[in-house]
Image (cartoon, rainbow, N blue to C red):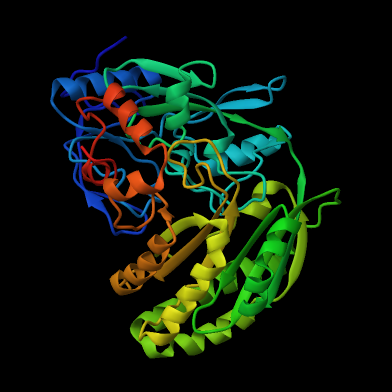
């Protein structure tokens, strides 16, 4: 294994010891200034970078595309950029798995799998994140039976705090596998992930406006009748937009080029961006804009391959808070949220998103051991968010909510110990794998304790 001299800067491959500037996340609400950045081109080079950081007494964190709204990836030590750790290592058609380098963006993985006639079973609604960043924070879509991206992991390879390379699965280091699929970057640096895949299939999406009262009254029925159900409620209105995705025998019938551009780009991004900008400048107009916006999207049905149905472009920048609740608490909490907004002076320009997930067996998954529903609230970038998010968080925590690890929240280890039955199991494993807190930062100190 080679060692790169600390003063040397390499181009294109290898761990670099270059001085670093300021790092910012996608939303611009988190910044950090690491001592140096490294760009390893292999698991071995990454392990060497971790050992060198330990020699220098520095912490280590990896950043992907910066789509987390928390400071989970921020560091004042060594910042690992995984841009050279990309691509598919192997496809096993007998086991129906794909092994992919940790820095691979989900978009590239989805496109590559589609070319091979394969697909993940479920995914979130954006695909800009790296596979390691998305899984480590618990990124999810919506599903009656199919769960988060992390729940589709079959094997993980990671570099631990002593610079060792560890592979874990249900049969190899199963106690690590049980936690590391959503590891928050606290247990090691992921170098490769093996996902379960299946032959590519078609989904029919049915988008339909619906009233708030109807959606909430029929929520259990809509969830039970559809493989993937979600909806958006527009604050200051009684209007929602619903989306039902179900497997289809075909044929494929994607949105027309013009209609797709009108819905996904012009209305959902272009016009919406202008509306948010106006609302930020003149908050009293937001309710009127919301009434117009919520009526602009019309019903449509289309059929396409999974990633083209599950995901959509998100070009309007925002801040987000999301809580996972027991599924039976979703409608009561949503009604409380609506009542809170209506009696407050708050002006909210972004819709509220509601999704579901089945229970899973990952220690710090927001759906760990319980069927869950997610309520996500957003505000346009640059809009004061504290009053709204504080009021929302109060409602969510009263229902035993678990915040998304990569989205804005104020909870700490004492709270998580109450809402995660296996929290102690994760902390004990962290003590064993990273006793010196090589992968710690302020965020992990708050949410995991020290």
Q: Is residue 274 visible?
A: no
Q: Is residue 265 above or below residue 145?
A: below
Q: Is residue 299 visible?
A: yes
Residue 66 at x, y percent in the picture: 37, 48
Quadrant including the N terminus:
top left
Residue 223 at x, y percent in the picture: 68, 59
Quadrant including the C terminus:
top left
Task: Name the residue nearer the viewer: 294 or 272.
Answer: 294
Quadrant housing residue 253: bottom right
The reply, left or right, for residue 105 in relation to residue 447 is right
Quadrant housing residue 16: top left
Residue 95 at x, y percent in the picture: 68, 21
The reply, left or right, for residue 449 in relation to residue 364 is left
Quadrant housing residue 72: top left
The reply, left or right, for residue 18 in relation to residue 239 is left
Q: Is residue 438 above or below residue 321?
A: above
Task: Name the residue nearer the viewer: 219 or 229.
Answer: 219
Question: Which residue, as the protein is rendered here, is positioned at the far left?
Answer: 56
Q: How many marks?
A: 0
The reply, left or right, for residue 41 in relation to residue 53 is right
Q: Is residue 197 above or below residue 224?
A: above
- Residue shown at 52%/83% (left/top)? 290
């Amino acid at each position: 294994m080679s060692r790169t001299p600390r003063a040397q800067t390499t181009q294109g491959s290898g761990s670099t010891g270059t001085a670093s500037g300021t790092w910012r996340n996608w939303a611009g609400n988190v910044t950090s200034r690491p001592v140096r950045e490294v760009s390893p081109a292999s698991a071995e080079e990454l392990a060497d970078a971790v050992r060198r950081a330990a020699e220098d007494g520095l912490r280590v964190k990896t950043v992907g595309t910066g789509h987390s709204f928390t400071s989970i990836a921020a560091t004042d030590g060594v910042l690992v950029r995984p841009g050279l750790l990309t691509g598919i290592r192997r496809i096993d058609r007998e086991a129906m798995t794909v092994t992919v380098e940790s820095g691979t963006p989900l978009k590239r993985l989805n496109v590559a799998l589609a070319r091979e006639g394969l697909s993940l079973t479920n995914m979130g609604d954006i695909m800009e994140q790296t596979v390691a960043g998305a899984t480590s924070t618990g990124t999810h879509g919506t599903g009656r039976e199919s769960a988060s991206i992390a729940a589709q992991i079959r094997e993980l390879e990671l570099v631990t705090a002593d610079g060792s390379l560890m592979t874990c699965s249900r049969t190899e280091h199963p106690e690590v596998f049980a936690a590391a699929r959503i590891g928050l970057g606290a247990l090691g640096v992921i170098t490769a992930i093996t996902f379960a895949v299946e032959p590519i299939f078609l989904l029919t999406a049915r988008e339909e406006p619906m009233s708030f009262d109807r959606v909430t009254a029929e929520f259990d029925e809509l969830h039970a009748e559809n493989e993937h159900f979600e909806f958006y409620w527009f604050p200051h209105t009684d209007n929602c937009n619903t989306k039902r995705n179900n497997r289809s025998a075909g044929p494929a019938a994607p949105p027309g080029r013009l209609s797709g551009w009108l819905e996904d780009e012009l209305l959902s991004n272009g016009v919406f961006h202008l509306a948010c900008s106006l609302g930020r400048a003149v908050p009293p107009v937001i309710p009127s804009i919301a009434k117009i916006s919520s009526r602009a999207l019309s019903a449509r049905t289309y059929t396409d391959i999974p990633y083209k149905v599950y995901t959509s472009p998100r070009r309007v920048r925002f801040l987000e808070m999301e809580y996972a609740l027991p599924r039976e608490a979703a409608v009561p909490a949503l009604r409380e949220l609506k009542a809170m907004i209506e009696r407050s002076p708050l002006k909210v320009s972004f819709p509220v998103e509601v999704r579901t997930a089945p229970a899973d067996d990952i220690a710090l998954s927001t759906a760990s051991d319980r069927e869950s529903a997610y309520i996500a609230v957003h505000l346009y970038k640059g809009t004061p968010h504290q009053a709204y998010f504080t009021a929302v968080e109060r409602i969510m925590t009263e229902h035993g909510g678990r915040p998304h690890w990569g989205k804005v929240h104020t909870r700490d280890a004492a709270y998580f110990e109450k809402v995660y039955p296996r929290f102690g199991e994760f902390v004990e494993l962290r003590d064993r794998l990273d006793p010196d807190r090589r992968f710690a930062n302020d965020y992990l100190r708050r949410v995991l304790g020290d």
